[in-house]
Amino acid sequence: MMLPILIGEIIVYQVTMLVLKLQKKGLKECLTRQITPSQGIIILAGMYAAHSDWIDYEIDEALRLGKTIIGVRPWGQERTPVKIQNAADVMVNWQQSSIINTVRIWI
């Protein structure tokens, strides 16, 4: 009796992993479709800790496609992730005028 349950759990796990892999692939394709026609991307550095896998993918795709990368430091944050600092063409502070002026200049 244990064997069919174990096999069932393995199959459910494999199907779940396949679905997650397809969802991840679909999201990557969607991000690439959005980045491709753009002139550049804006990366909010404060989001990196929670979403580093996706931000890494966005940065890597932007670099691969030759897009401008603008990094935005969150208000009051002293440290910025190194990946964003290294990839960004320019880093700006979290102020409306800074972001708008930088977009006008770089993008």
Image (spheres, helix red, strand yellow):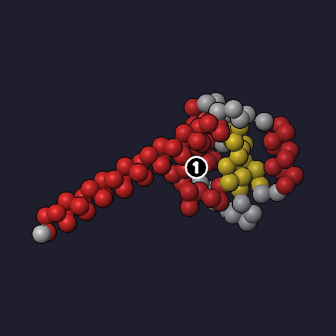
User: Which quadrant of the rendered structure holds the C terminus?
Assistant: top right
Left or right of 46? Residue 20 is left
Q: Amino acid at mark 1?
A: Ile
* Residue 94: image location, x then y, percent: 77, 57
* Residue 42: image location, x then y, percent: 71, 46
Q: Residue 64: tell me if it is visible.
A: yes
Q: Residue 59: tell me if it is visible.
A: no
Which residue: 62% across, 59% down?
Answer: 47
Quarter occupied by residue 29: top right
Depicted 1 relative to depicted 66: above or below? below
In-front residue for pair 37/93: 37
Q: Give neighbour class at mark 1: few <14, some 14-19, many 20+ (Cα, 10 Å).
A: some
In-front residue for pair 22/58: 22
Q: What residue is shown with label 1?
A: 55
Depicted 37 relative to depicted 70: above or below? above
Left or right of 40? Residue 105 is right
Secondary structure type for disc 1: helix
